[in-house]
Image (tube, rainbow, N blue to C red):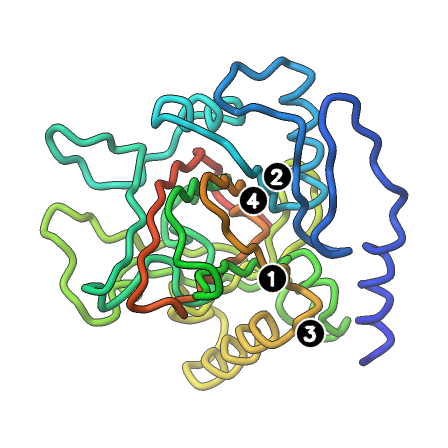
Amino acid sequence: MEQFALDAIEQVTTRPPEVYDTIAVEPLTPVIGAEVSGLDLSKELTDDQVAEVKRAFLRHHVLVFRDQTLTGEDHKRVAGCFGELHPVTLPVEGSDPYILDISADSNSRAVAGHGWHADGTADLRPSLGSMLYITRTPEPGCGGDTMFANMHLAYEMLSPAMKELLDPMTAVHDGLLAWEGKTPPPEYDVPVHAHPVIARHPDTGRKLLYINGVYVSHIEQLSKGESRAIIDMLVKHITNTALLHCRVRWTPNTLVFWDNRCVQHHAIWDYFPHSRYGQRVAIAGHRPTA
């Protein structure tokens, strides 16, 4: 591995540990993900608890809360501690636009979240983050894990020359691409927006790689062939660099909260014909900036 990549990893892994008073935080890997214990999310969180979860969130980007018993209102209340809710479904009479059912079984021919991506990056203001609460998992040993990748580190592991090339560029994110050739419902206003290829995290100011293979159609400053080659290279970098990743093994009644601004995820569909069920709530975000 090149020295600049090793230096980037070392910078993250040698940070002094954080100290928490109201929660316990156990990292999943040195660079992304942590399990949080000491909280009952069915109860109102104190200001100190919310502040410490936010601090852990900014450091680890993916937080796992196990053995939680939540209603839909509990789920939305917890998400609301971190910002306004972001609609996750099209308006349908009698349904809650802020709760998305995530379900797969023996009749499924596709599943939500399969393939590396961040949620809704074609939107003008993609969500800050998502909270996915899984209540039914496949039988033990039958899969259903979700993988997450650190986009800060994905950027930092690039060569100085590649960083300089990408820094002023913008990429077009097209919501139609996620439909994979299918026709979206007529009431869906397909979003298409350009965002920086290298964005900055709004809370920390850290740079991150803002490219994914699900929504990005092209890089505006390059020819069609150049754009495709660069996108493919960056997507391969994200998906094939194991050092960027953590893997969450779901157990019933687990909630995972991830930072959609600097994390990509991949829901592994390796459990067919077994079933999995959960609900996702998202938090409103801001337009990515360079």
Q: Secondary structure at mark 1?
A: loop
Residue 202, labelled with which disc? 2
Verify CB contact (< 8 Å) between mark 1 and mark 3: no
Q: What residue sits right under mark 3 in the picture? A: 162
Side (left or right) of 215 relative to 205: left
Q: Tell me the CA gap for discs 1 and 2.
A: 18 Å
Q: Secondary structure at mark 3?
A: helix
Does residue 32 appear left or right of residue 8 in this picture? left
User: Which residue lies under the disc numbered 1?
Assistant: 168
Q: Which of these two is toward me, 49 or 197?
A: 49
Which of the 4 quarters of the picture holds residue 161? bottom right
Category of crowding for the residue at label 4, using alpha-carbon neighbours closer than 10 angstroms: few (below 14), some (14–19), many (at least 20): many
Q: Distance between the Cα atoms at labels 1 and 3?
A: 11 Å
Judge the density around disc 1: few (<14), some (14-19), many (≥20) Cα neighbours within 10 Å.
few
Q: Residue at x 32, y 62 (%)?
A: 274
Q: Earlier in the sequence, mark 1 or mark 2?
A: 1
The CA span between labels 1 and 4 is 24 Å
Q: Amino acid at mark 1?
A: Pro
Amino acid at circle 2: Pro
Which residue is label 4 attached to?
259
Q: Position of residue 95 (x, y in %)?
A: 18, 31
Crowd rating for badge 2 (residues with CA inside 10 Å; few <14, some 14–19, many 20+): some
Q: Considering only order in the chain, which callout, 4 or 2, is on the residue closer to the N terminus?
A: 2
